[in-house]
Image (cartoon, helix red, strand yellow):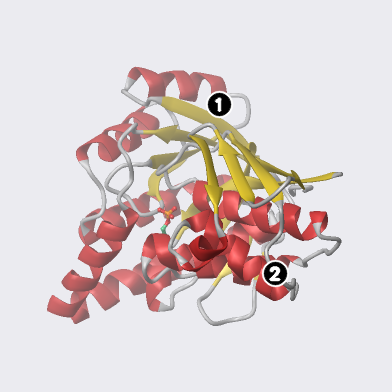
Amino acid sequence: MSATASAPGKIILFGEHAVVYGRPAIAVPVLQVASRVTVEEAESGVHVVSSRGSRTLLPGDLNGDDPIAAILRHTLSAIQYPGFPNITITIDSTIPVAGGLGSGAAVSTAVARAMALHLGRTLDAATVSALVYEVEKIHHGTPSGIDNTVIAFGRPVYFMRGRPIEMLIVPRPFTLVVADTGIAGLTKIAVGDVRRSWEAGRERFEALFDRCGDVARRARALIEGGRPEMLGPLMNENHAALREMGVSCAELDTLVGAAITGGALGAKLSGGGRGGNMVALVKSGTEAAMAEALLRAGAKRTIVTEVGGSFEC
Ligand code: PMV
């Protein structure tokens, strides 16, 4: 008897950082990468097997900060499972780590679903999202909740902290090229630096956050109005605001510049910044050439993704 569940990667298309301060943001699943988790019966204890090696969790470990132990603890509590299960959790993920593609939230999502399934329960997306949010707090300190939401629902979202989740309607799909600087993104540090800068200059930072929020609202109207090809200038404007916040870096700026020079409709860093990934909007049919241009400009890997589908787990 075994149970398997998967969860996609994600990128933030508009509004990162400002979303922590209550402005809207847009995130979309990246279906070309995923975390896949299988849970099966074991003789005793919880064994975790992944490409990073194997380990065994003891009942006492459940209270610690280990992310797998944490999602286990929250899931067992949500399904009111009495005691400690005897299971092997096998994690297989193609989502690059520390790149702003949501690898941690995707693994947690797949573990929660596969474990609940193995124990004879199913969890709805909102419940999974809330459980994963608890684990995200360990990684990120004060996460806005956008990662767990887009990954648990597996659909494009228009997200505002503390507001009911809104799915984004995408009547006309569009194509993105995501490129990795190869530098580990430093979301927690970038979020902390933005907070310090905001405390030191609230007026300037509130204005920057407003600009990002405005961009996200206009982007939503274009996406839902079936005019995604017009999103480019909004991506460029969002990147400029993120640079002003101090969360870009030379490598991200180089890739964004190369995307624009290579004919992208728009480009920006995505996620926490200081490394990780950038994203370019391209005309359908030009994605292969754009991926090559980004690799020539120093990207370590690229992913071509189309926004408009949904993830079946
Ligand atoms: O680096 P990522 O993709 O996990 O994105 C972080 C997004 C921030 O807005 C910077 C932080 C947050 O919690 O929303």
Residue 300: quadrant of the picture: top left
Image coordinates for residue 78, horizontal then vertical, percent: 70, 74
Q: Residue at x 59, y 55 (%)?
A: 108
Q: How many residues crowd around disc 1 within 10 Å: few (fewer than 14), some, or many (20 or more)?
A: many
Q: Which is nearer the eye, 296 or 207?
A: 296
Q: Which is nearer the eye, 39 or 146?
A: 39
| Residue 203 higher or lower than 289, as above or below | below
> Mark 2 highlights which residue?
83
Image coordinates for residue 226, horizontal then vertical, percent: 69, 53
Q: How many residues crowd around disc 2 within 10 Å: few (fewer than 14), some, or many (20 or more)?
A: few
Q: Residue at x 50, y 19 (%)?
A: 289
Residue 157: quadrant of the picture: bottom right
> Does residue 182 appear left or right of residue 10 in this picture?
left
**CA distance for labels 2 and 1:** 51 Å
Question: Which mark's residue is nearer the viewer, 2 or 1?
Answer: 2
Q: Which is nearer the eye, 102 or 295?
A: 102
Q: What amino acid is labelled 1 in the image? A: Glu
**Who comes first in sequence, dot 2 or dot 1?**
2
Q: What amino acid is labelled 2 in the image? A: Gly
- Secondary structure state at the residue bearing disc 2: loop
Tell me if I can see residue 101 in this picture: yes
Tell me if I can see residue 16 in this picture: no
> Mark 1 highlights which residue?
287
Image coordinates for residue 83, horizontal then vertical, percent: 70, 69
Residue 250: quadrant of the picture: top left
> Does residue 275 appear left or right of residue 162 in this picture?
left
